[in-house]
Amino acid sequence: MYKPLLRAGLEVIPDAVPASAPPHVLGYEPERIFGGFRVDYRDRRLVERLNEGWYDLAVSAGLFDENREFLLNLPRGTWTAAVDRRLLHRVHVWHRVRLLDRWDLVGAGAASFLGVRAGHPGFAAMALDNSVWILTDTYESGVGLYAVRDPAGSPGVVRDLEWLARENVYKDPEFRRDVTVWLESRQQRQVLSGGS
């Protein structure tokens, strides 16, 4: 997985995901969405405009730390994008990455683990402090990107994670364990801070 991501301008930092990072689910409330844009597939500068727009949104939303590091949702235990695409229900987990000086997430990245082919991305990124998700996905006529504020504090995200802790939807015991551990640590943080 590392070589294709390196070609896309991402350095993977192994075993460095903060324990506070919530497993990725899409249960957030619409009012948490801020910032975003869409580019039509017919745009001749599709990849270039998406890369520029993604970076601008990432900077304005606060995705990067001082070293341009963030979390990226990638397959666990898959070494090629082709295998990942064949395993349709494979669970993706956070990996810590650093954006290098030369990068191409929507072109070279989407041709590997970040989509189905160049110009057709599909990936989620999260700030190291959980303050924002940036979601990138393909739709019928174009690609859309948008930011979601404080996903770890979203009641809908927590509700979806609680459901996944009870139901073995993905048939992935490791993911289910990750969800349970995160929910338990969240509850402990709330007790320590005097919250409900």
Image (cartoon, helix red, strand yellow):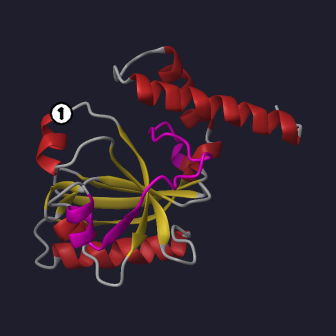
Quadrant of the rendered image containing residue 118: bottom left
- Say left or right for 166 vs 91: right
Q: Can you say which quadrant of the picture contains the C terminus?
A: top right
Q: Is residue 166 magenta?
A: no
Residue at screen point 43% across, 28% down = 174
Of 129 and 97, nearer the camera is: 97
- Say left or right for 137 vs 64: left
Q: Position of residue 181 (x, y in %)?
A: 60, 30
- Say left or right for 145 vs 7: right
Residue at screen point 36% across, 24% down = 172
Q: Where is residue 36 in the image (x, y as percent from the top left)?
A: 41, 65
Residue type, label 1: Leu
Q: Does the magenta stretch include residue 24?
A: yes
Tell me which secondary structure the magenta stretch mostly adopts. loop
Secondary structure type for disc 1 = loop
Q: Name the residue under label 1.
A: 87
Boundaries of the magenta span? 2-30
Q: Is residue 164 above or below residue 8?
A: above
Q: Which residue lies furthest to the front in this view?
A: 15
Q: Can you say which quadrant of the picture contains the N terminus?
A: bottom left
Q: Which residue lies furthest to the top in this view?
A: 167
Of 114 and 144, nearer the camera is: 114
Q: Residues within 10 Å of mark 1 (few under 14, many from 20)?
A: few
Q: Is residue 124 visible?
A: yes
Residue at screen point 86% across, 38% down = 192
Quadrant of the rendered image containing residue 42: bottom left
Q: Where is residue 23 in the image (x, y as percent from the top left)?
A: 49, 39
Q: In this view, does 156 lie above or below 5?
A: above
Of 46 and 191, nearer the camera is: 191
